[in-house]
Every structure is written in C-alpha cells, then in structure tokens.
Image: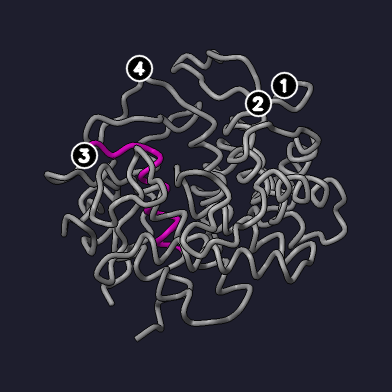
Amino acid sequence: MNAAPAVSFDHLFRLTDDIGLFEHALGSVPRREHGYCVDDVARGLVVLAREPSPGLDLVRLFELYLDFVLAAQAADGTVRNRRDSDGRWMDDPGLGDCWGRALWGLGTAAATGPTRRLRARARDGFLASAGGRSPWPRAMTFAALGAGEVLLAHPNDEPARALLTAAVAMIGPVGADPGWPWPEPTLRYANGAVPEALILAGMCLPDKALLADGLRLLAWLLQVETRGGSLSLTPVAGRQPGADRGPAFDQQPIEAAAIADACARAHAATGRRRWLAGLGRARGWFLGDNDGATPLLNPDTGGCYDGLERAGRNLNQGAESALALLSTAQHARRLLAATP
C-alpha cells in the first residue's frame, strides 16, 4: 500500500483567523472575501475531536471552532451557515445541511472533545438543536452521525436516540434491487455518510437489521465507486442508475473522505479486514491512485487540491478539501499503519 499521508494541521492553521475557518483559497492563500461557513467549521470540529492527545494549539483551535458553531445557533435550534470576514452572519437560520453538520460536529465534540469543559459546552449546543427535524434527507444523515457519537459515549441519551431514530426513517429503506439498493434516485454528495449513518444506528439503537443494511449499502457503494482496484468517485453532477461505469469528473475530496469514514465505522462495527481495503482505496485516491493518476495532497503546504479534473486537478486548496484529507489521514494512521 502507499504510505499514509501525514496528519499535518499546517494548512488548517493557514486558513484560520481569530473568527473562523475561511471556506475558499486561491492556491494555498485564504480568500478572505468569501468568508466562512458552518459546513466547514463543523467538519473541523469533527476532525479535531478525533485527534488523540492534541497539543494546546489544537485545543485552542477546537475552542475557536466550537465558539463559531455555537454562535451560528438561533434560539430555536436552527443554524445559520455563512459569515463574512467581519463576523456578520449573512443568512437566516434553518434546518439545511449546515444544521445537520453542526449537530455532527457538536455531537462528536461532546463525545470525544479534548477537555471536560469543552465537551460540556458542545453537549449543551447539541441538545439545543437536537429537537429539530429537517425535511432534507442528507441534513438528517449528517445529524445522525452526531447523534450516534453521543450515544456511543452516553448510551441512555434520549434526545440523541430520538434524533437518530428519526434520521433513519428519513433516510428510507435500503432497496431490494441488487443493481440499485440506494435509498435515493441518484448518488449525490458525501455518499458514504448514508451507509455510515445506518451502520452507526445499527450499533447504537441497537438494531442488527439496520447494521446489515448499512454494511450491504456500503459494499454496493464501494463496488460502484471502484474501477480497476482504485476509487472512481461519483462526480459533482451525481450518478444515476444505469450510468456508464467509466471515469467521470469533477471528483471531490469530500467523497473519498466519506468513504473512509464509512469504512472505518464498518470496521469498528465488525472487525472485518475487508473494510480496511476500502479505507486503503480512499487513502490511495488522495495519493494519486485515482482515475487521473494525480496526487491531491500538496506536501509543501499540507493542503489538498480541491478536485480531480479530467485534465488534472483544481489547484485551489480550500477548507473542505483540507479537512477531507486530514480526516482520511487520521483513519489511515489509526487503522492502516500496521497493514502490510
């Protein structure tokens, strides 16, 4: 296997100021005029909460991101997403993906954050938004990931259990058609989060049938998104039933990271090495084992290029991509270091 990418937070610090994490970059330079978004800062919380034995600099970064997500919450638990570089919120609060990702970040931070005080603050924030129910399945999927993390740490947490149960119902049943068991009419974005949410629900509720459904869906997704032994990810435009299995572009780092998350979760649920192979493909995608034979990791900056294109790669290195690389590298360091 290719060597695991190093877990370097240098580029994350480069993209962060005293308010939050800048969404976009021109090359490796933050584009301050585009401001920040909860979608990315919440992902940052997840990554920082997973880091073992973080130093003081990472604990301070964790607290900054936690402050940002908590400030995005309205009194009724809905969440704003966009903030300008002067700190002004630019949109109305709602129950879209940013709400779901906020719950994912807050739930993970509440379960595994670096200090008791910060875990307690994150738990209060999680409870403030956990009573909401989004009409959008992907938002509920992200929320399920946070609820599951809370339940892994606190199995009797009723708000988290109710949210996870509602998210499973929103995701919908896994289909019987082996050619398209996906619970949506098309593969869209962050697809690995869907089977991960079902696997996590199967672990936490607990429900053996849900766990089996999540594992079956992940196995199918890996089959659909593998070509010649390498990941061939669903492109930005999505993938529909019957689509050509040839390479399609643009491919985004968030897709590889979602696969890595789901495979790590499946391994935690089953202990089976087959899921480490899927994680290895996700790691390899960043290192050039992909449809373009093009590395997405920038070893000079510690960042990640924003997309795999037909003629190369998007040379910008924004927050979403940096966090996708970091998340996958964390799983690889933990689970693949001893894999021959």
Please state which amino acid type lies under the numbered disc 4: Glu
Q: Earlier in the sequence, mark 3 or mark 1?
A: 1
First in residue order: circle 4 vs circle 1:
4
- Tell me what residue is drawn at x 53 percent, y 54 percent: 182
Residue at (43, 30) in percent of width and height: 17
Q: Which residue is mark 2?
A: 79
Nearer mark to the viewer, of 2 and 4: 2
Residue on which disc 1 sits: 74
Q: Given the current orientation, which residue lies at the most extreme left position?
A: 311
Q: Of label 2 and label 4, which has the lower sequence position?
A: 4
Q: Which residue position holds label 3? A: 314
Q: Quadrant of the C terminus?
A: bottom left
Number of other residues with Cα within 10 Å of mark 1, as a class: few under 14, some 14 to 19, many 20 or more: some
Q: Is residue 310 left or right of residue 338?
A: left
Position of residue 319 measured from the top left corner of the image (x, y, whole percent): 39, 38
Closer to the camera: disc 4 or disc 3?
3
Image coordinates for residue 200, horizontal then vertical, percent: 67, 61
Q: Residues within 10 Å of mark 4 (few under 14, many from 20)?
A: few
